[in-house]
Image (cartoon, helix red, strand yellow):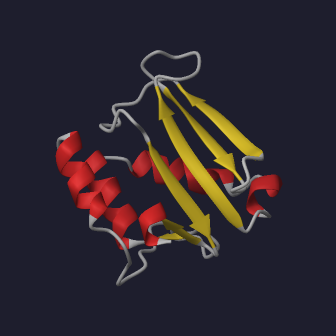
C-alpha cells in the first residue's frame, strides 16, 4: 500500500477518464473511472467499490440518479473502523453502513460520486 501523500498526489492528477472499467459482471453494475481504479489499486480498496455496488440493490439508493458516497474513518461505534454514507448530493441520507475495521490509508477518508452508472472521483465530475 502506498503512503497517504503518494496517494493524494496521484489522485490530484485524476481530472478526467480515458476509459470506463467494468469490475463486476452484472450488466447493471456501475463502471469505474481511471481515477477510481487508481484509488482502488493504491489503497487496496476494492472492498469499498464492492460495498457501494452492493447498496445498489436497495431500491431507495438505486433510484437516486446522483449519489455521493463518503467514507469517514474513526467514526461510529468502531474505533478502528469507518462509516460509509450515501446521500443524494443535497445531504439527504440514503444509506449508512458501519464497518468494524478498515486499513484505508487516507485518514481523511474519501468521497466518490455515482452518476449515470459511473463511479468517479469528485475531480472527475
- In the image, what residue occupies the spot 72% across and 55% down? 88
Q: Is residue 53 left or right of residue 20?
A: right
Can residue 86 be seen at all in this image of the molecule?
Answer: yes
Q: Is residue 5 left or right of residue 81?
A: left
- In the image, what residue occupies the spot 58% across and 50% down? 69
- In the image, what residue occupies the spot 68% across and 65% down? 66
Q: Between residue 44 and residue 4, name the one nearer to us.
A: 4
Can residue 121 be seen at all in this image of the molecule?
Answer: no
Q: Which part of the image, by quadrant, shows the N terminus?
A: top left
Q: Between residue 86 and residue 108, name the one nearer to us.
A: 108
On the image, the x and y values in percent for residue 63 come to: 80, 64
Q: Is residue 68 left or right of residue 102?
A: right
On the image, the x and y values in percent for residue 36 come to: 39, 62
Q: Between residue 56 and residue 16, name the one nearer to us.
A: 16
Taking 36 as reference, is 34 above or below it?
below
Q: Quadrant of residue 14?
A: bottom left
On the image, the x and y values in percent for residue 116 come to: 64, 75
- In the image, what residue occupies the spot 40% across and 51% down? 46
Amino acid at each position: 500500500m502506498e503512503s497517504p501523500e503518494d496517494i493524494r498526489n496521484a489522485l490530484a492528477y485524476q481530472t478526467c477518464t480515458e476509459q470506463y472499467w467494468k469490475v463486476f459482471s452484472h450488466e447493471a453494475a456501475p463502471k469505474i473511472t481511471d481515477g477510481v481504479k487508481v484509488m482502488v489499486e493504491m489503497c487496496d480498496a476494492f472492498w469499498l467499490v464492492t460495498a457501494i455496488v452492493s447498496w445498489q440493490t436497495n431500491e431507495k439508493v438505486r433510484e437516486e440518479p446522483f449519489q455521493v458516497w463518503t467514507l469517514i474513518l474513526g467514526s461510529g461505534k468502531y474505533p478502528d473502523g469507518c462509516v460509509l454514507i450515501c446521500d443524494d448530493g443535497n445531504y439527504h441520507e440514503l444509506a449508512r453502513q458501519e464497518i468494524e475495521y478498515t486499513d484505508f490509508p487516507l485518514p481523511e477518508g474519501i468521497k466518490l460520486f455515482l452518476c449515470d452508472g459511473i463511479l468517479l472521483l469528485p475531480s472527475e465530475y
